[in-house]
Image (spheres, rainbow, N blue to C red):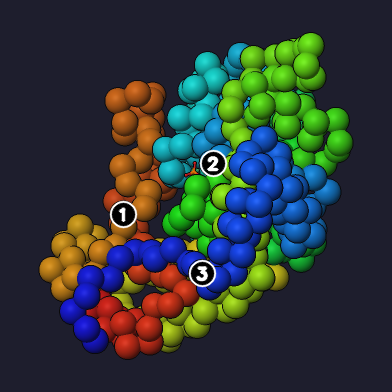
Amino acid sequence: MSNDPIYVTKPFLPPIDEFKSYIDGIWDRHALTNGGPLHKELEDKLCDYLDVPYISLFNNCTIGLMSAFPVLGIKSGEVITSPFTFVATAHAIKWCGLTPVFVDIDPETLNIDPTKIEAAITPDTKAVMAVHCYGRPCDVDAIQALADKHGLKVIYDAAHIFGAEDNGGSLARHGDLAVLSFHATKVFNTFEGGAIICHDKDTKDTIDRFKNFGIVDDNRIDMIGLNGKMSEIHAAMGLAQLPHIDDAILERKRVYDLYHKLLVNVDGLRLPNFDGLARANYAYFPIIVGDDYPLSRDKLADKLRNHGIFTRKYFYPLITDLKDYPSGDFPVAKGMANNILCLPMYPDLGNDQIEAISNLLR
Ligand SMILES: *Cc1c(COP(=O)(O)O)cnc(C)c1O
């Protein structure tokens, strides 16, 4: 193995010539943003690929998460969510002037534990914002049943799920809205980007107005929208990448399979599994470092770093340990935040690199 550092991820890039041919078109047309032709083409192709009825592209997932609440008419109240996620989930709730109410996670799926949701519902509860953590599905049926019973909206932070499918299709189809991330570190990227999936034309029209300042037409602005638009150059990246994404996911599977084979018998390490999925996207390779492993999670991360291998304590610190959020007793999430470590995982991680990392872990 060379001595080059290995980072937790390395963005997947399409062949540069394929990207450039889209850029040539942008220079010809002088259409740079505001729903240009590449934007339209990417929306159509993603609806096809994900097999969802409507998608609205965004400049990133965080703005998409923030837009979800006003689009659904939620202006005040409480939103039930998971503490074990990237801070953007909770920040989006706060930016909308809403109150996040945290519920502990399931120790198997690391997603919000539906058996604990009902106890957190109050007369002020408006929605559940659940996260399909690491691309593994939430218990969508249990969450929908609770939402129906209590009249709540369901929004999925679907930042991790691109390409992941359960027996009914893409995980993106669940919930009133699902919000994807196309950030550089995600399975499918547009440099920066995101999208909201919805299920009817009226909602799509509302989302598209909202992300364009609330502008209806030359004479009317009917809500306090924001600027959530994706530019043509970002859409070009998505279009250039999409034809290669299935191959990229296959490469991720190769990485997953080799790590799994080399690490499955190491005492004290719990490996990720993608049970319950018809197709996994292998977005991350999170290991859980147990008490019976010779090093703590932090010592292990330090040791790997000394060998030029940069892992991520993803998700640490826990959101409920940040000063801007209410603390609480979430033993499962807390245990995960203290013991989880994401190993390098990306399509062109070489077998020799995976072997070297695994040898260190062993
Ligand atoms: C990456 C991520 C986001 C934020 O996505 P951006 O596109 O960077 O705004 C939100 N939620 C989760 C769970 C994420 O991993």
Residue 226 to residue 53: above or below:
above
Quadrant position of residue 42: bottom right
The three-letter code of the residue at mark 3 reads Ile
Q: Nearer the viewer, residue 211 or 180?
A: 211
Q: Position of residue 232 (x, y in %)?
A: 62, 47
Which residue appears at 69% of the width and 64% of the height? Answer: 165
Count of all numbered marks drawn on residues in the image: 3
In the rendered view, would you say 192 is above or below 17?
above
Whether residue 280 can be seen here: no
**Which disc number belongs to residue 16?**
3
Dot 2 corresponds to which residue?
A: 60
Element marked by disc 2: loop
The answer as to whether callout 2 falls within 8 Å of ligand 1 is yes
Q: Quadrant of residue 327?
A: top left
Kindly report which numbered mark, 2 or 1, lies closer to the viewer in this rendering: 2
Badge 1 amino acid:
Lys
Q: Residue furthest front?
A: 28
Separation of residues labelled 2 and 1 (CA atoms):
22 Å
Query: Given the image, on which type of amino acid does mark 2 rest?
Result: Asn
> Which residue shows up at 37% across the image and 49% down it?
315
